[in-house]
């Protein structure tokens, strides 16, 4: 499996924010346990690779020439 980065800086930042917000809302009791799904965008932000982007042929990071 090819784990070449396909998520750009802005994309990764937004993923991290969404992930952290979902986890924080879960920990504070504002939303149910489904908020732990925030781990997924947080993880993909950390590694810079999104499996859905690979399947769809999307790449938001700059390419090297």
Image: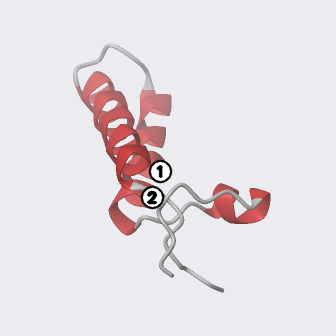
Q: Where's the N terminus, which quadrant?
A: bottom right
Left/right of residue 56 with respect to residue 21 in the rendered view:
right
Tag 1 residue: 40
**57 or 41, which is in the foreground?**
57
Residue extending farthest to the front is 65
* Residue at figure coordinates x 53%, y 54% from the top left: 60
* Residue at figure coordinates x 51%, y 82% from the top left: 65
* Residue at figure coordinates x 30%, y 22% from the top left: 25
Residue 23: name its quadrant.
top left
Left/right of residue 58 with respect to residue 46 in the rendered view:
right
Dot 1: what SS? Answer: helix
Assess disc 2: are there few (<14), some (14-19) or many (≥20) residues with their C-alpha within 10 Å of its C-alpha.
many
Dot 2: what SS? Answer: helix
**Residue 43: x and y, percent?**
40, 58
As drawn, 46 above or below 40? below
As drawn, 33 above or below 41? above
Tag 2 residue: 44
**Residue 6: x and y, percent?**
54, 65
Residue 22: name its quadrant.
top left
**Residue 50: x and y, percent?**
56, 60
């Amino acid at each position: 499996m090819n784990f070449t980065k396909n998520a750009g800086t802005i994309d990764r930042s937004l993923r991290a924010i969404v992930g952290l917000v979902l986890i924080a809302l879960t920990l504070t009791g504002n939303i149910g346990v489904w908020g732990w799904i925030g781990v997924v965008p947080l993880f993909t932000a950390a590694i810079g690779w999104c499996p859905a982007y690979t399947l769809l042929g999307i790449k938001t990071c700059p390419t090297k020439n």
